[in-house]
Image (tube, helix red, strand yellow):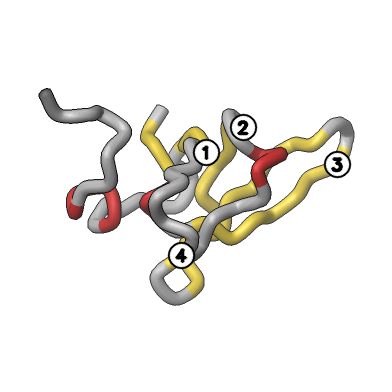
Amino acid sequence: MVDIRSSSITRSLQEFQTGEKVGIDIDPSTHKGMPHPRFQGYIGEIEGKQGEAYLVGIKDGKKHKTIIVRPEHLRRI
């Protein structure tokens, strides 16, 4: 039986477009590009790309924050 949360090559090769909605789902087996654990489960929007990572805009209370996350830690919504 294959674990759905297991780190696979397809998760790291995901491509996202600007404006696409994504959920932050931290993969603990990959530390590189991992957002702070407080952002686990947040829903955000892709604002751009920075190297291999994506800029994700989220609402944290009343504030807008932009965090840098690699695609292994993102899922399409």
Give the label, 3 or 1, closer to the camera: 1
Residue 13 at what x, y percent from top left? 24, 57
Residue under pointer 1? 24
Q: Residues within 10 Å of mark 4 (few under 14, many from 20)?
A: some
Q: Which mark is residue 53?
A: 4
Q: Is residue 61 above or below residue 47?
A: above
Residue under pointer 2? 42
Verify CB contact (< 8 Å) between mark 3 and mark 1.
no
Cα distance, mark 2 to mark 3?
14 Å
Three-letter residue code for mark 2: Tyr
Residue plotted at (58% across, 51% down): 56
Comes first in the chain, label 2 or label 1 = 1
Cα distance, mark 4 to mark 2?
17 Å
Q: Which mark is residue 63?
A: 3
Q: Is residue 48 in view from this perspective?
A: no
Verify CB contact (< 8 Å) between mark 2 and mark 1.
yes
Q: Is residue 46 in view from this perspective?
A: yes
Q: Residues within 10 Å of mark 1 (few under 14, many from 20)?
A: many
Verify CB contact (< 8 Å) between mark 4 and mark 2.
no
Q: Is residue 72 left or right of residue 54?
A: left
Comparing 71 with 1, the one in front is 1
Comes first in the chain, label 3 or label 4 = 4
Q: Is residue 65 left or right of residue 19?
A: right
Q: Quadrant of the N terminus?
A: top left
